[in-house]
């Protein structure tokens, strides 16, 4: 009986086949969070949709993702880890095919929602499977491998999406998942363990409903807020009320339920709470950085998707390599607090450098070394934060903490993107108003520039009236570009400030000197 009670871990080729399978699935799910972003114009044109309608292709996936992730621990226990993970892969793969095959925008939005339901399980369950596959002394290695996938997914999405859209069609950003999904489903069914567990008491349907309403409305608010001018829209106000009401009811329900669908009581563990908060900050930093950098270099420096992505990749690979080093350092007793402080300091440094370098004169080499600094920073954040979150947990608490921390990481990305997008938009308007005061006939420099442009256009065959009108348009366009560039550079600085504010949370973690973080229980 004592032998049977002990957790059994995988060895040899089987262990690495499971690892490759779950990491591939996690990367595939994260790629699909950003792969559509670069293809929205082609999708809108091909399906005859407006820009606002096409935005729902991204929103639908994000909403179903954020809803399903905290439920993965419960669903994995209910159906069995292998059954649930394999079924999620199959659902994700079928939905991917149907997305590519869609002939209307709302059919595509529906299948993207279904794809997100399957994809959300791939992320949180992947980490749980890895923790149960590796013995406690190799937890750092499992977290390092998973963390590399976490960083690579959002980074590869725009690059892969841009390449497939430019060279084939937007449908291929979905079709590319099909062969990977088929192979992953076969390997998952054959190698992953995990039988269903008998639930004690009734299923917490009210908790599930409150979670869907609360978290789904919050994600909807974040995705649509800026497009609908926030609280000037009744839609956003209703979403806010539903989000607050749903989340409050969910928390109250889960604290009282005998068989909670999401056991938020794991957050009573100080390290779980601190680790989850740091995962929130990590999600905010990585998603906002991946958003600002491509928009800046493609919108203002004229780079294409391939050129943009190739410059990101060295930093992403560096992150993956450093995660292994972090795991080894934690195993040797190095405090995760030290690693986390260093990691966040590197991210803050990257944001400051990007703020200073975001000018029209910037080139590849100007952005390469800051990307490497960012890679170092992210490499020193994920593994210590994940180890801090899962250390000392047993059995089902591992899956619950994993689901919550992964949900908070995605929520951090969503909240961060909403804040940064709103901040940049407002700063563009402010800078345009400031710069406009200098563009008048009373400003000698502006007057001289206006005369030069008019003369050039008239020498090209334009009439005096046409030349003057076109010169004013050029001046206005220059004004827009300059105000936008300043605002986006300030966006980098804002991310750094947010990370600096969150950084002190590291010191609230409870770690004894020389303590090595391990997970106490497996299956």
Image (cartoon, grey):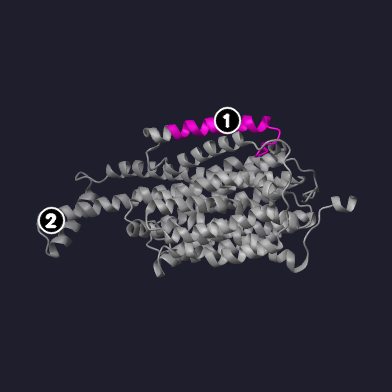
Residue 466 marker: 2
Nearer to me, 421 or 500: 421
Residue 223 on the magenta segment: no
Q: Residue at x 42, y 42 (%)?
A: 224
Nearer to me, 317 or 8: 8
Residue 248 marker: 1
Confirm or deny contact between disc 1 and disc 2 (CB under 8 A). no
**Which SS class for mark 1?**
helix
Q: Residue at x 71, y 33 (%)?
A: 258
Mark 1 or 2, nearer chain start: 1
- Image coordinates for residue 164, horizontal then vertical, percent: 44, 67
Residue 159 visible somewhere in the drawing? no
Which region shows up in magenta?
Answer: 238-264
Residue 406 marker: none
Q: Is residue 223 left or right of residue 90?
A: left
Nearer to me, 121 or 275: 121
- Image coordinates for residue 300, horizontal then vertical, percent: 37, 57
Nearer to me, 70 or 140: 70
């Amino acid at each position: 009986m004592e032998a049977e009670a002990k957790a059994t871990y995988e060895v040899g080729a089987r262990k690495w086949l499971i690892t490759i399978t779950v990491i591939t699935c996690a990367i595939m799910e994260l790629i699909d969070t950003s792969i559509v972003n670069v293809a929205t114009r082609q999708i809108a044109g091909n399906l005859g949709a407006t820009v606002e309608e096409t935005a729902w292709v991204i929103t639908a996936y994000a909403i179903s993702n954020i809803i399903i992730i905290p439920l993965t621990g419960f669903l994995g226990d209910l159906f069995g880890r292998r059954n649930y993970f394999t079924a999620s892969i199959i659902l994700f793969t079928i939905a991917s095919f149907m997305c590519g095959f869609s002939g209307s925008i709302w059919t595509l939005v529906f299948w993207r929602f279904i794809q997100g339901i399957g994809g959300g399980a791939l992320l949180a369950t992947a980490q749980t499977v890895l923790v149960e596959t590796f013995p406690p002394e190799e937890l750092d290695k499992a977290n390092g491998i998973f963390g590399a996938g976490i960083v690579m997914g959002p980074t590869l999405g725009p690059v892969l999406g841009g390449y497939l859209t430019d060279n084939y069609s937007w449908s291929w950003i979905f079709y590319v998942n099909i062969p990977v999904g088929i192979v992953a489903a076969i390997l998952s069914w054959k190698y992953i363990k995990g039988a269903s567990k008998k639930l004690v008491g009734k299923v917490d349907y009210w908790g599930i409903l409150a979670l869907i309403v609360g978290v789904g409305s919050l994600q909807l608010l974040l995705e649509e807020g800026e497009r609908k001018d926030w609280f000037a829209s009744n839609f956003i106000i209703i979403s806010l009320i539903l989000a607050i009401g749903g989340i409050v009811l969910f928390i109250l329900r889960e604290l009282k339920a005998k068989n909670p669908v999401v056991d938020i009581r794991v957050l009573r563990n100080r390290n779980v709470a601190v680790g989850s908060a740091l995962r929130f900050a990590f999600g905010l930093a990585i998603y906002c950085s991946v958003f600002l950098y491509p928009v800046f270099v493609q919108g203002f420096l004229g780079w294409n998707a391939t050129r943009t992505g190739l410059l990101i990749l060295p930093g992403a690979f560096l992150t993956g390599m450093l995660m292994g080093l972090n795991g080894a350092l934690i195993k040797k007793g190095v405090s995760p607090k030290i690693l986390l402080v260093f990691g966040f300091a590197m991210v803050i440094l990257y944001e400051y450098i990007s703020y200073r370098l975001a000018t029209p004169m910037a080139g590849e080499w100007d952005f390469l070394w800051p990307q490497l600094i960012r890679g170092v920073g992210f490499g020193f954040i994920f593994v210590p934060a994940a180890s801090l979150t899962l250390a000392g947990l047993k059995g089902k608490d591992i899956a619950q903490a994993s689901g919550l921390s992964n949900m908070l990481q995605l929520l951090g990305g969503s909240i961060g993107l909403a804040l940064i997008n709103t901040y940049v938009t407002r700063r563009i308007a402010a800078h345009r108003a400031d710069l406009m005061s200098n563009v008048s006939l009373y400003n000698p420099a502006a007057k001289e520039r206006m005369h030069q442009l008019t003369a050039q256009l008239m020498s090209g065959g334009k009439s005096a009236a046409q030349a003057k009108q076109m010169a004013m348009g050029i001046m206005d366009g220059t004004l827009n570009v300059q105000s936008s560039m300043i605002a986006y550079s300030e966006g980098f600085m804002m991310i750094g400030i947010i990370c600096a504010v969150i950084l002190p949370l590291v010191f609230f973690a409870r770690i004894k000197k020389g303590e090595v973080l391990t997970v106490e229980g497996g299956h």
